[in-house]
Image (tube, helix red, strand yellow):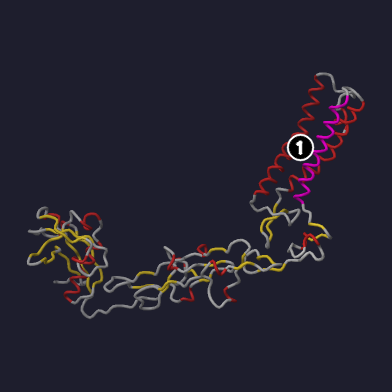
Amino acid sequence: PSFDSEGQVQGRLEVKVGDDWVTMSGRGGGFYYGDGGAESTVACRQLGNELGYTLVSASKVGKGDTDDGSGTIYEVTCAGTESTLDSCTTFAYWGSYFHDFDVGVSCTFLAPGDECEECVAGKSSGTTGVAACTSCAAGSYSTVGAASCDVCPAGTYLEDAATSASLHDSVEDCDVCPAGSFLEDDATSAVLHDSVEDCEVCPLDTALEDDATDASLHDSLEDCSSCPTGSTPLADLSGCKALLLCADDEYMKDEAYGDANCLTNQVGWNQQLSFFVYVYGTLSALGYLRRKASRRPEGSAERRSCYEQIVLLAVLSYSPLVQNATSMYRCVGDPDVGSVLASDARVSCETSALRTFTNIHAMAVIAIVGVGLPLFIVWKMLQLRREDKLDVDSIYAGLFEW
């Protein structure tokens, strides 16, 4: 073919099939349903191979830039990696009309005397006869002049080169998953690992020591191991820490507890238990006094005494109840065990059925006791005042006095 100064040649695409030259249809196959890039690349590659030229680039030419052909028309659909058109997915008879849609291609080859350049590190050529090297995908790397990129080994990941100061050219660029996490072999994954988020954290009650102390990288869930008796995983699951055993305790023998939970000859107490005791202890006492009052004659001194005890109990328990309820919502982060109560690090604020149960109780106390009781007093006082019953004989007189 006749090349221009840039090593380019273009024209109507024809392929010899048997004894006939056939044109390629622009009304079917990849030239019609796609951009024709893959088909043009294969056509130019085949031409270059036949003539001994190295392909640099290929593209489809608009139908107005070539002359119309004649005779048989074929359609073709390619992936772009084939060496000949007849090895493409589709290469078959299409018709013998609409030659005004015959396809043309433009091929650029290396000019005589030109040489191929090696791909820089972090890029690869993939196949021969390409216009430019392509960057390795995230999770892979390459050395200078590589035809393909190498995948980071299991237990490591590699972020996209576009986010890095330089391209990735060594396995040393692959980052090891943090302690307490692992990353399975890429061969078992649908995509390459390109982020630390791909690293999987070991399950609860297991740990995984730092890779720097291990002979190999962590690439399986089996690398996570349970902590031995008397220890618990660190917050980052990078190892285990020893727990204090409650010595000489018949009820806690051979059981590991945090040092704050070890009390002399008894199981540890905490703020959460105190809260429930305040709630249900107060309710039980109020229920008992209310039932006792209902059994006394109306207007009797015994009945009035019961109501005065109810008032006294309500006033004395108001502040502890509300303070305990609000303390159930004040949580802080603990480096070893996660979110815990600010008032008692032995009580976890992590999501659980017990935590939900506690929150419901705390919310009820704040609403009914903290807000409801003062509003009830104000409302009842205004009602009694309107009815002119706000006097010393009212069963609420003690409450207002307090």
Q: In this view of the protein, which residue sits in the foreground, 35 or 33?
A: 33
Q: In this view of the protein, which residue sits in the foreground, 96 or 5?
A: 96
- Image coords of residue 140 (percent x, y): 43, 70
Task: Relative to 240, say whether 374 is above or below.
Answer: above
Q: Residue flagged by tag 1: what amino acid is it?
A: Val
- Image coords of residue 127 (percent x, y): 30, 72
- Image coords of residue 137 (percent x, y): 40, 67
Q: Farthest residue in the front direction?
A: 250
Task: Relative to 307, say whether 252 is above or below.
Answer: below
Which span of residues is magenta-colored?
Answer: 271-296
Would you say the magenta stretch is mainly helix, strand or loop? helix
Name which quarter of the figure residue 228 lies in. bottom right
- Image coords of residue 307 (percent x, y): 86, 30
Measuring 79% from the left and 64% from the top, which residue is drawn there?
Answer: 246
Measuring 75% from the left and 50% from the top, which residue is drawn there?
Answer: 272
Q: Give the left or right position of residue 73, taking residue 29 as reference.
A: left
Q: Secondary structure beneath disc 1? A: helix
Measuring 64% from the left and 51% from the top, which residue is drawn there?
Answer: 352
Name which quarter of the figure residue 50 lies in. bottom left
Measuring 68% from the left and 49% from the top, which residue is drawn there?
Answer: 354
Give the position of the N terminus as an image quadrant. bottom left
Q: Which residue is mark 1?
A: 369
Name which quarter of the figure residue 190 lies in. bottom left
Decide whether residue 285 is among the magenta residues. Answer: yes
Q: In this view of the protein, which residue sits in the foreground, 361 or 134?
A: 361
Mark 1: few/some/many CA within 10 Å (<14, 14-19, 20+): some
Decide whether residue 65 is among the magenta residues. Answer: no
Q: Give the left or right position of residue 205, taking residue 309 as reference.
A: left
